Image (cartoon, rainbow, N blue to C red):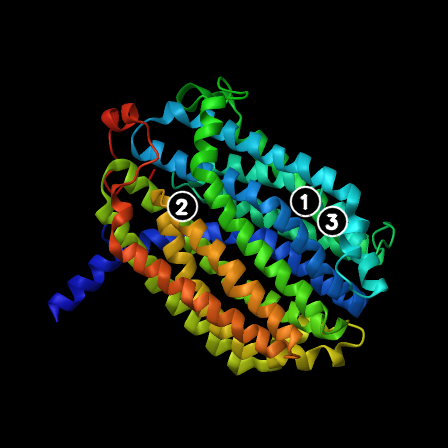
């Protein structure tokens, strides 16, 4: 009995144990879920506006993500550099890493600004109903102009999160999500003296929150008291060598984001060919799935940080233990989420149906996909946790090539064949689950092979002089 108690206590309190993952993951899930929550609230309010508005929100926001996410994923890999510098005891290198990430974020913003000029032509190629296409163009054009500020804020936020200080991310995420609810309600329907902008109002609400959040992060991080140790002001500017290193390791991570985003965008565009109600119901099911995965995003972010810190300190064996702890916690959570979804059933649709128009045609589609939502949640949990650990160690190219093969040959082409032969939305979701499950098993096998333990993002001079952090987080 004493051995069991000791084992449980060690698993909770020991190095890289459950407690450490929880302390990091809880604030991070709030922060990382803030953007998803904003999109979710947009869709809830738009579901009250019209089925066409709800249907249009998925492809429009998905296309923004698909174009920008390679830049976002690359820029966010800054956190891995900061974590490994922190683990090696080289804090003076943090500033140039942050500015390299900000540079990549604004390169992506510039590209999206150009693409927004051709929104009409892009959505004309999709073939959706005229009413839906007009709303897609409206939402897409506005949404294109807030992501650069959002990404820059996320990069600057890694100054805290990569060193294990995740509470600022939580509070800023909560504040922006709360503001987004108020602005959504005001701008979509016209309250508090503001005009009723409908579809455009939801996009403008998120735009304001993204820019305000970026400004708050800049004011919080770029202070003189941080400059002496981390050079966040002294190293302001373009650092070609650091940008090249970020692109070298971060681009595969950005490709991971891109492939995920492109796969979902392709999925929603293909499902859109089945009709507006089918697309709207699929979007609702996907949004429920996204709600369920928010804590998994936090656990994945915490895993990547801890593995990167231990990798920088030269103790990858603790990274293995941290990954195992995070996976155990994530699977317990996902089991509870699955039970909740099965037990409550239609209750989870209430936020979408409370003020929705013609939701009776949408609800049966969404309800029929609940089983796939649960199965996909478990597959994505395993996939995300192992991918986060591998990315924290720097094993990003393997992830990129695996997802490239999966997204093209294993996902989009089969979906097109299912559409061609007349299969419905349930068959497409079933294939989604199968593909995610195969990728999860591949990432698990890669992690268990241990090939990642000898990798490092650090220059030889940094490795030679690292101080190490053992199992401590500031």
Q: Are marks 1 and 3 in contact (CB under 8 Å)?
A: yes
Between disc 3 and disc 2, the foreground one is 2
Quarter where residue 299 is shown: bottom left
Q: Residue at x 20, y 57 (%)?
A: 10
Q: Position of residue 290 (x, y in %)?
A: 56, 63
> Would residue 24 be visible to someone looking at this image?
no
Quadrant location of the N terminus? bottom left
Q: Position of residue 361 (x, y in %)?
A: 75, 80
Q: Residue at x 72, y 77 (%)?
A: 362
Quarter where residue 127 is shown: bottom right
Task: Identify residue for label 3.
Answer: 205
> Would residue 452 be visible to someone looking at this image?
yes
Quadrant location of the C terminus? top left
Q: Position of residue 210 (x, y in %)?
A: 66, 43
State the separation of the CA atoms marked 3 and 2: 34 Å
State the separation of the CA atoms marked 1 and 2: 31 Å
Observer-nearest residue: 107 or 420? 420
Task: Identify residue for label 2.
Answer: 396
Between disc 1 and disc 2, the foreground one is 2
Observer-nearest residue: 187 or 47? 47
Observer-nearest residue: 90 or 267? 267
Observer-nearest residue: 159 or 103? 103
Tag 3: Cα neighbours inside 10 Å, few (<14), some, or many (≥20)? many
Q: Residue at x 61, y 81 (%)?
A: 368
Task: Identify residue for label 1.
Answer: 209
């Amino acid at each position: 009995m004493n051995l069991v108690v000791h084992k449980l206590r060690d698993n909770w309190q020991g190095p890289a144990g459950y407690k450490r993952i929880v302390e990091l993951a809880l604030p991070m899930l709030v922060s990382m879920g803030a953007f998803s929550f904003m999109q979710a609230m947009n869709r809830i309010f738009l579901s009250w506006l019209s089925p066409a508005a709800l249907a249009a929100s998925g492809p429009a926001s998905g296309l923004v993500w698909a174009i920008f996410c390679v830049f976002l994923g690359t820029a966010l890999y800054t956190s891995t550099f900061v974590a490994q510098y922190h683990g090696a005891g080289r804090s003076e290198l943090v500033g140039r890493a942050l500015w390299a990430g900000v540079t990549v974020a604004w390169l992506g913003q510039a590209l999206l600004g150009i693409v927004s000029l051709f929104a009409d032509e892009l959505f004309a190629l999709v073939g959706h109903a005229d009413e839906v296409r007009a709303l897609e163009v409206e939402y897409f054009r506005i949404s294109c102009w807030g992501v650069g500020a959002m990404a820059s804020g996320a990069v600057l936020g890694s100054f805290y999160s990569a060193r294990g200080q995740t509470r600022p991310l939580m509070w800023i995420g909560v504040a922006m999500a709360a503001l987004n609810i108020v602005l959504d309600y005001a701008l979509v329907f016209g309250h508090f003296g503001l005009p009723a902008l409908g579809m455009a109002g939801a996009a403008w609400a998120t735009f304001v929150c993204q820019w305000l959040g970026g400004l708050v992060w800049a004011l919080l991080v770029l202070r003189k008291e941080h400059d002496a140790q981390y050079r966040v002001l002294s190293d302001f500017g373009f650092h070609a060598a650091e940008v090249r290193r970020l692109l070298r390791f971060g681009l595969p991570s950005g490709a991971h984001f891109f492939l995920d985003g492109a796969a979902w965008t392709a999925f929603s565009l293909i499902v859109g060919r089945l009709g507006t109600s089918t697309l709207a119901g699929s979007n609702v099911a996907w949004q429920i799935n996204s709600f369920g995965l928010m804590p998994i995003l936090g656990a994945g972010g915490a895993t990547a940080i801890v593995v990167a810190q231990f990798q920088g300190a030269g103790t990858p064996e603790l990274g293995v233990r941290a990954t195992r702890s995070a996976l155990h916690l994530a699977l317990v959570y996902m089991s509870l989420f699955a039970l909740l979804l099965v037990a409550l059933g239609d209750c989870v649709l209430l936020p979408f149906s409370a003020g929705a128009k013609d939701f009776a045609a949408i609800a049966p589609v969404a309800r029929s996909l609940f089983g796939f939502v649960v199965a996909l949640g478990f597959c994505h949990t395993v996939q995300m946790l192992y991918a986060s650990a591998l990315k924290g160690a720097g094993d990003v190219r393997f992830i990129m090539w695996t997802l490239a093969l999966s997204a093209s040959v294993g996902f989009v082409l089969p979906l097109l064949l299912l559409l061609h032969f007349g299969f419905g939305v349930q068959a497409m979701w079933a294939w989604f689950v199968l593909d995610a499950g195969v990728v999860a098993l591949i990432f698990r096998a890669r992690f268990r092979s241990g090939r990642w333990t000898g990798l490092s993002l650090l220059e030889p001079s940094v490795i030679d002089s690292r101080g190490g952090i053992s199992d401590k987080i500031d």
